Image (cartoon, rainbow, N blue to C red):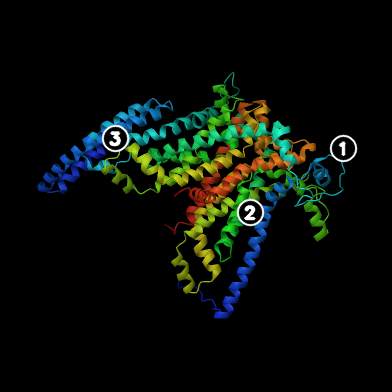
């Protein structure tokens, strides 16, 4: 520290002005970045209230409805924030007239929900073990979990496929759900949360005569509850978004989740696709609105593999 | 398991031997009396305790783990014996703790570890029927495979560009939110929300923006009089995918950096400022030093996420992307279709080895750089 060169101190007023200007510039930067971050989502939502004719007129070029001579196709693409006529027509179609989309939405739900619930449940138990046990063997196993967690799908899908093939569950939803349940991600996060419980809590509870199962349910679980919420959210987004697993495990396209189906929309259904895309992002966005604090906490937990 | 128990037992024995030596006889008499009292108290409690452990046993048995009831019994039995032992409180290697790990351990073994070992074996075999041992031949064929080489090259290029950008830009965002700007929590929310939006939902608008006649070309034409670029169907699609990747991942990384920034001891920064260290000096010599484990983690995380970029590419461009975006996952998908287990296993093994090398290298690098900052 002593070798630090003394930088010329600014005088009080000048320094304050300098700080003010920096703050203003930084705020502008942040606002611009925020605008870029939000725009795509907002555009998708607002555009879902456009009628199909307006969509064709504005974006016809992109989705190639050009062959349809009845609709007017503009030369350029006009990105619009607010539709000329606000209509819920696309939603009505999506929910009532075109059950295909609803079916795919249900496919997403039926794949994601069991994974989210059971991966977390398995992890709550396992993390207790990982946090409490001591010894070299445990360290090695936990390290193995971390390595597994860090492996990309290209690596883990091959063993998963092999097992699914051997168990005869290929091309059923189980081939995605079962490996998902035992994915080590939630175990890793929850172990970090469990380890933060001071060991004196356990000792005090034992002195008071609590059995270990009681300690687990009445002391550990309440203390990691917020971490459990964040794990639920994080696992949910991960699997709600899945593309790779269904492509490989499910050759039957009728079981594919909405994420894959959305990318294969027919050009005539563009407006519908915007509406469905909005419906598709609704669960995770709602979760975000209610659980942002948990999410932030959960992400912070995941930081620092070594800790 | 048995060995472990013995070890634990001997550890307990040792601690017992040591403790009485430290205490005077009178004290140990008192302790003994206390111990009796405690024992009586425990006799009452143990009824409740056992009912709890009984409750536990079926709960675990539901998962189909035969070991659970046994574990419950040994646990209950162990408790009675334990009353005399003070080390019981600090001994955390209990059967219950083992039992909690079982479901996860068994699942991971079945779905990940055992098949992975089989895959290592497969990667050395000629074909699944004759099962001739050919050692590295599969790897040789794989490395000569044109599409594998192309996929590997494209993936590496994408990662090499995406990862540093993801780390630096998210660090910048975290820096913004760590400074004295207003509405910080609003900004944090806005930066974080793309993370919650499924890629598939956003692909439509991305296609509108980056179409040849799309908005981005319009803007570029209007402001810089640039020639329109066919973003999706040229090598420029790399940029489009990259933007989508950054848009989605920066928020998560930013939160990691923010939490690390808040863990830097404030007094250290204040002292540095008093000593006359400039903002730049504080950034490089204090903040970055303290952030180095997080930088490592974010780098690894971004690396893994960049391997998942297939998702974005697939949703944007479908099954047959522009050649520059033919990624390893595309290669794997095609190999899955032909069900060539040898090729698949060899490819998975190669990738696993490369990942381990990269991650291990990053760990070693971080250890060197951040070694003098111990929390």
Q: Residue furthest left?
A: B26
The residue sitting at 57% across, 80% down in the picture is A13
The chain containing the residue under callout 3 comes to: B
Separation (CA) of disc 3 from disc 2? 55 Å
The front one of A266 and B81 is A266
Label 3 crowd (10 A; few <14 / some 14-19 / many >=20): many
Q: On the same chain: label 2 and label 1?
A: no
Residue drawn where x is 35% and y is 36% of the image: A213
Q: Is residue A84 above or below residue A261?
A: below
Along the viewing direction, whichever of A172 and A291 lies nearer the viewer: A291
Query: Does A58 sit left or right of A186 as displayed?
Result: right
**Residue at image x 49%, y 28%?**
B110
Q: Secondary structure at mark 3?
A: helix
**Alpha carbon distance from label 3 to label 1:** 75 Å
Q: Could you tell whether B76 is left or right of B275 in the image? A: left
Mark 3 highlights which residue?
Answer: B49
Q: Residues within 10 Å of mark 1 (few under 14, many from 20)?
A: few
Residue B190 sits above or below residue A156 on the image: below
Q: Which residue is mark 1?
A: A68
Which of labels 3 and 2 is toward the front? 3
The chain carrying label 1 is A
Percent of width and height locating residue B127:
60, 22
Name the chain under label 2: B
Mark 2, other Cα within 10 Å: few <14 / some 14–19 / many ≥20: some
Classify mark 1: helix, strand or loop.
loop
Residue at 48% x, 32% y is B108
Location of mark 2 (residue) = B165
Viewer-nearest of discs 2 and 1: 1
Q: Is residue B14 left or right of residue B194?
A: left
The answer to whether residue B302 shows anywhere in this view is yes
Locate the N terminus of chain B by quadrant: top left
Q: Are marks 2 and 1 in contact (CB under 8 Å)?
A: no
């Amino acid at each position: 520290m002593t070798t630090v060169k003394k930088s010329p101190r600014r005088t009080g007023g000048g320094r304050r002005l300098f700080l003010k200007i920096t703050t203003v510039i930084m705020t502008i930067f942040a606002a611009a970045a925020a605008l870029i971050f939000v725009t795509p989502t907002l555009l998708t939502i607002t555009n879902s209230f456009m009628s199909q004719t307006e969509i064709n007129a504005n974006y016809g070029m992109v989705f190639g409805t050009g062959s349809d001579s009845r609709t007017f196709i503009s030369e350029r693409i006009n990105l619009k924030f607010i539709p000329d006529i606000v209509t819920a027509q696309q939603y009505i179609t999506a929910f009532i007239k075109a059950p295909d989309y609803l079916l795919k939405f249900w496919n997403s739900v039926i794949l994601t929900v069991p994974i989210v619930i059971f991966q977390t449940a398995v992890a709550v138990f396992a993390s207790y073990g990982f946090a409490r046990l001591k010894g070299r063997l445990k360290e090695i196993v936990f390290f193995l979990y971390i390595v597994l967690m860090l492996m990309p799908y290209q690596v883990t899908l091959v063993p998963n496929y092999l097992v699914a093939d051997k168990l005869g569950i290929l091309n059923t939803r189980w081939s995605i759900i079962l490996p998902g349940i035992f994915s080590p991600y939630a175990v890793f996060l929850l172990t970090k949360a469990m380890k933060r419980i001071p060991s004196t809590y356990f000792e005090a509870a034992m002195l008071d005569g609590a059995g270990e199962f009681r300690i687990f349910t009445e002391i550990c679980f309440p203390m990691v509850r917020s971490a459990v919420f964040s794990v639920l959210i994080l696992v949910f987004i991960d699997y709600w978004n899945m593309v790779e697993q269904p492509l490989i495990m499910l050759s039957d396209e009728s079981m594919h989740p909405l994420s894959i189906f959305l990318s294969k929309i027919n050009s005539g259904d563009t407006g519908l696709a915007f509406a469905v895309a909005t419906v598709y992002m609704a669960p995770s966005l709602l979760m975000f609105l209610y659980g942002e604090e948990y999410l932030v906490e959960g992400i912070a937990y995941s930081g620092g593999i070594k800790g | 398991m048995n060995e472990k128990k013995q070890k634990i037992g001997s550890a307990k024995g040792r601690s017992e031997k040591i403790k009485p030596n430290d205490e005077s006889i009178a004290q140990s008499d008192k302790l003994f009396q206390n111990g009796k009292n405690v024992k009586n108290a425990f006799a009452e409690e143990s009824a409740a305790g056992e009912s709890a452990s009984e409750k536990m046993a079926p709960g675990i048995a539901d998962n189909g783990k035969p070991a659970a009831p046994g574990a419950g019994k040994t646990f209950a039995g162990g408790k009675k014996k334990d009353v005399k032992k003070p080390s019981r409180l600090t001994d955390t290697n209990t059967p219950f703790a083992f039992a909690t790990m079982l479901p996860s351990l068994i699942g991971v073994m079945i779905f990940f570890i055992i098949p992975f070992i089989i895959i290592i074996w497969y990667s050395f075999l000629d074909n699944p029927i004759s099962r001739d041992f050919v050692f590295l031949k599969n790897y040789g064929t794989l490395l000569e495979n044109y599409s594998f080489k192309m996929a590997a090259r494209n993936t590496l290029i994408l990662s090499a560009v995406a990862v540093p950008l993801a780390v630096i830009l998210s660090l910048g965002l975290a820096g913004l939110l760590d400074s004295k700007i207003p509405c910080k929590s609003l900004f944090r929310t806005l930066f974080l929300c793309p993370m919650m939006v499924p890629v598939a939902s956003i692909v439509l608008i991305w296609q509108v923006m980056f179409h040849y006649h799309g908005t981005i070309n319009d803007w570029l034409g209007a402001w810089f009089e640039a020639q329109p670029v066919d973003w999706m169907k040229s090598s420029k699609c790399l940029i489009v995918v990259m933007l989508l990747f950054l848009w989605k991942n920066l928020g998560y990384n930013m939160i990691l950096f923010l939490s690390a920034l808040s863990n830097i001891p404030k007094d250290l920064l204040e002292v540095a400022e008093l000593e006359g260290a400039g903002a730049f000096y504080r950034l490089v010599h204090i903040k970055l030093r303290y952030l180095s484990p997080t930088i490592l983690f974010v780098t690894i995380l971004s690396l893994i996420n960049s391997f998942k970029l297939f998702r974005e590419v697939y949703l944007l461009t479908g099954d047959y992307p522009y050649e520059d975006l033919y990624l390893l996952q595309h290669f794997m998908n095609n190999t899955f279709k032909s069900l060539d287990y040898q090729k698949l296993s060899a490819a998975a093994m190669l990738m696993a080895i490369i990942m381990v090398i990269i991650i291990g290298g990053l760990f070693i690098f971080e250890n060197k750089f951040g070694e003098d900052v111990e929390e």
